Image (tube, rainbow, N blue to C red):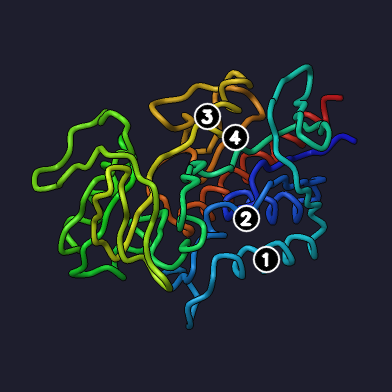
């Protein structure tokens, strides 16, 4: 089946774009393997129109229902490859999909560690966004897990707000310069400690660190890999787009955390809408020429 528009990623950017393309009468499919970074958001209170905090899962589920009511198709799948042969072909775990236009909106592909306490304490002291959650750790001691540019960015967001922040590289070599006053611990982690909330971490040498929050900033190249497979240009850890969310590949767009910038829900929603406004005339022109 040929779709007019396929959104890879069921987060705010992909779903926002789908609302617009479907209302423009484009046959639209949203493919996502999970709820993205919002699945781990315990509460959101800095998004427009929210009188009370809402969980990330609830926000995504509401938008999915909204999209389906407008005729958007949803598929749970993981895309491994994107190619072009007169149109786009997306190969996933559960099958292949064909489309006239594609939006990459898989987020920054945040990685985590498979260690004791990491999964159990997600949303209860473990965060994946310093801009979102630094406010909740005012005057507290926290740690950032990572060793590259994204981790340094998170440090910069936390330093003006928290009491102290320690950078944990988990045995990896540090690849970026660390701001003054930040302690760096390179020892591998074996657990995140705490009963109801994060209380600290334990290292492989038996030493411990007290911390009320752990910000995971390991990063991921998931969206980058898809972009490169399709021939799109990248810059640093981001997919390169213009102000219309267009990549250098005609018909291929990107929006949300995978293009960098302000990693916020409101930004992703706006970028998704802009991408849709670019996709709609592109698809109409393609269909008219056939």
Residue marked by disc 4: 253
Residue marked by disc 1: 61
Q: Secondary structure at mark 4?
A: strand
Give the distance between the C-alpha atoms of the residues marked 2 and 1, in whole angstroms.
9 Å
Graded by Cα atoms within 10 Å as few (under 14), some (14 to 19) or many (20 or more), the crowding at tag 1 reads some
Indicate whether 206 appears above or below 288: below
151 to the left or right of 139 = right
Graded by Cα atoms within 10 Å as few (under 14), some (14 to 19) or many (20 or more), the crowding at tag 4 reads many
Cβ–Cβ under 8 Å for marks 2 and 4:
no
Mark 2 or mark 4: whose residue is earlier in sequence:
2
Mark 1 or mark 4: whose residue is earlier in sequence:
1
| Position of residue 2 measured from the top left corner of the image (x, y, whole percent) | 86, 34
Identify the disc placed on residue 35: 2
Quarter the C terminus occupies: top right
Give the distance between the C-alpha atoms of the residues marked 2 and 3, in whole angstroms.
19 Å
Mark 3 or mark 4: whose residue is earlier in sequence:
3
85 to the left or right of 159 = right
Cβ–Cβ under 8 Å for marks 2 and 1:
yes
Give the distance between the C-alpha atoms of the residues marked 2 and 4, in whole angstroms.
20 Å
Nearest-to-viewer mark from 3 and 4: 3
Nearest-to-viewer mark from 2 and 4: 2
Residue marked by disc 3: 224
Q: Secondary structure at mark 3?
A: helix
Graded by Cα atoms within 10 Å as few (under 14), some (14 to 19) or many (20 or more), the crowding at tag 3 reads many
Q: Name, please, the residue furthest toward the bottom.
A: 51
Identify the disc placed on residue 215: none
Give the distance between the C-alpha atoms of the residues marked 3 and 4, in whole angstroms.
12 Å
Q: Quadrant of residue 192?
A: bottom left
Q: Secondary structure at mark 1?
A: helix
Comparing 186 with 159, the one in front is 186
Which residue occupies 73% across, 47% down?
30
Indicate whether 22 appears above or below 289: below
């Amino acid at each position: 089946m040929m779709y007019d528009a396929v959104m890879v990623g069921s987060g705010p950017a992909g779903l926002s774009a789908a609302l617009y393309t479907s209302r423009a009468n484009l046959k639209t499919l949203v493919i996502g393997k999970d709820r993205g970074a919002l699945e781990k958001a315990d509460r959101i209170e800095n998004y427009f129109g929210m009188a009370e905090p809402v969980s990330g899962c609830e926000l995504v589920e509401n938008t999915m229902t909204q999209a389906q009511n407008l005729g958007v198709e949803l598929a749970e799948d993981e895309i491994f490859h994107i190619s072009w042969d007169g149109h786009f072909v997306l190969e996933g775990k559960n099958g292949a999909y064909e489309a006239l236009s594609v939006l990459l909106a898989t987020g920054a592909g945040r990685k985590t560690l498979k260690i004791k306490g990491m999964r159990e304490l997600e949303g209860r002291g473990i965060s994946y966004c310093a801009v979102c959650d630094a406010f909740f750790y005012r005057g507290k001691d926290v740690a950032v897990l990572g060793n590259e540019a994204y981790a340094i960015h998170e440090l910069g967001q936390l330093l003006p707000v928290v009491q102290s922040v320690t950078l944990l590289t988990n045995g990896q070599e540090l690849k970026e310069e660390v701001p003054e006053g930040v302690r760096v611990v390179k020892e591998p982690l074996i657990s995140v400690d705490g009963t109801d909330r994060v209380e600290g971490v334990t290292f492989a040498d038996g030493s411990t660190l007290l911390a009320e929050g752990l910000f995971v900033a390991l990063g991921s190249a998931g969206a980058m890999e898809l972009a490169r497979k399709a021939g799109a240009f990248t810059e640093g850890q981001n997919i390169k787009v213009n102000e219309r969310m267009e990549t250098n590949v005609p018909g291929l767009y990107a929006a949300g955390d995978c293009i960098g910038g302000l990693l916020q829900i409101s930004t992703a929603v706006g970028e998704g809408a802009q991408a849709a406004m670019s996709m709609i005339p592109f698809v109409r022109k393609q269909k008219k020429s056939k």
